[in-house]
Image (cartoon, helix red, strand yellow):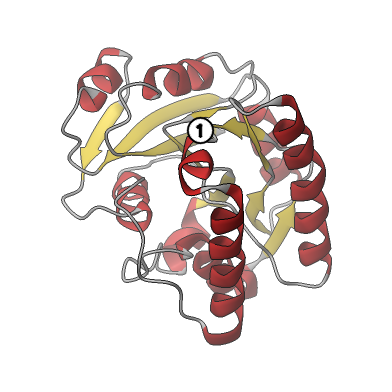
């Protein structure tokens, strides 16, 4: 199986090198296509990505939806796996994804939890207990809370669903999941975890960050709309 890994990026020169390195360190028999969807970074992000062998697709519109969509449009893999430019994926990440899609032809979207890579011990422990519990519970009641930095789709179904809704500033991952659900199986997998930087959480402060994203998720699930105020990030 060819798995296309799409990394959304914007001004991530400090992190993207280690993200790409973690993707290239995958222990799998499956082939990997590495694509960076970049929002016209003004630092060395693109230069680093190209030097490390990634295909870079530039997108003038700056949002996670636009950058991921730009990368996905050029993907050739049967499966597209999405992550972010400040993530570190474990060596078996691609193999787990490919195995799940190979085992279930009806599987159209697979997602897992995200933990902090650079937080204190207490913060890390909390992220590893609260996050999976919340995601498991919501998946059991049919309110999937896909996290854009750690999910994968079957490309043909993704294209049939129309890809990301680029009019959404946030919650594009939740929206895509909702539109793909009628087209196949959606699965939450607790063992499919990755680590991401906690720098934005620290910048906002935990109360504000958690309140914003919980309110955003509730708003989307109830109305189909999301918050429109969000900084330019991947």
Q: Quadrant of residue 190?
A: top right
Q: Is residue 135 left or right of residue 219?
A: right
Give the camera-side residue of 169 and 78.
169
Q: Secondary structure at mark 1?
A: strand
Above or below, 15 against 149 in this view is above
Residue 207: where, in percent of width, then height?
61, 55
Residue 115: where, in percent of width, then height?
66, 36
Report the residue marked by disc 1.
2
- In the image, farthest residue toward the bottom: 223
Above or below, 145 against 215 in this view is above
Q: Give the mark count.
A: 1
Q: Residue at x 74, y 53 (%)?
A: 188
Residue 6: where, in percent of width, then height?
42, 38
Q: Quadrant of residue 178?
A: bottom right
Above or below, 217 against 9 in this view is below
Q: Residue at x 54, y 47 (%)?
A: 205
Q: Which quadrant would the C terminus be assigned to in this image?
A: top left
Q: Residue at x 48, y 26 (%)?
A: 32
Above or below, 98 against 167 in this view is above
Give the camera-side residue of 58 and 17.
17
Q: Residue at x 71, y 71 (%)?
A: 143
Give the camera-side residue of 210 and 71.
210
Other residues around mark 1 within 10 Å, as few (<14) / some (14–19) / many (≥20): some
Q: Is residue 113 left or right of residue 126?
A: left
Residue 125: where, in percent of width, then height?
79, 33
Q: Which quadrant would the N terminus be assigned to in this image?
A: top right
């Amino acid at each position: 199986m060819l798995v296309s890994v799409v990394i959304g990026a914007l001004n991530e020169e400090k992190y993207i090198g280690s993200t790409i390195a973690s993707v290239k360190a995958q222990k799998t028999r499956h082939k990997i296509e590495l694509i960076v969807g970049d929002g016209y970074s003004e630092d060395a992000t693109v230069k680093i990505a190209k030097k490390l062998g990634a295909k870079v697709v530039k997108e003038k519109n700056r949002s996670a939806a636009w950058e991921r969509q730009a990368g996905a449009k050029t993907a050739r893999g049967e499966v597209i796996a999405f992550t972010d430019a400040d993530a570190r994926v474990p060596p078996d990440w691609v193999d787990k994804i490919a195995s799940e899609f190979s085992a279930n032809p009806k599987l159209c979207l697979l997602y897992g939890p995200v933990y902090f890579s650079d937080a204190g011990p207490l913060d890390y422990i909390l992220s590893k207990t609260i996050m999976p519990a919340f995601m498991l519970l919501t998946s059991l009641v049919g309110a999937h809370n896909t996290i854009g930095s750690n999910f994968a789709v079957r490309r043909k179904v993704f294209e049939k669903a129309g890809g990301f809704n680029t009019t959404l500033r946030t919650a594009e991952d939740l929206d895509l999941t909702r539109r793909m659900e009628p087209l196949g199986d959606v699965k939450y997998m607790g063992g499919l975890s990755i680590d991401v930087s906690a720098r934005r959480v620290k910048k906002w402060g935990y109360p504000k960050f958690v309140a914003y994203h919980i309110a955003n998720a509730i708003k989307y699930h109830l109305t189909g709309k999301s918050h429109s105020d969000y900084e330019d990030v991947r």
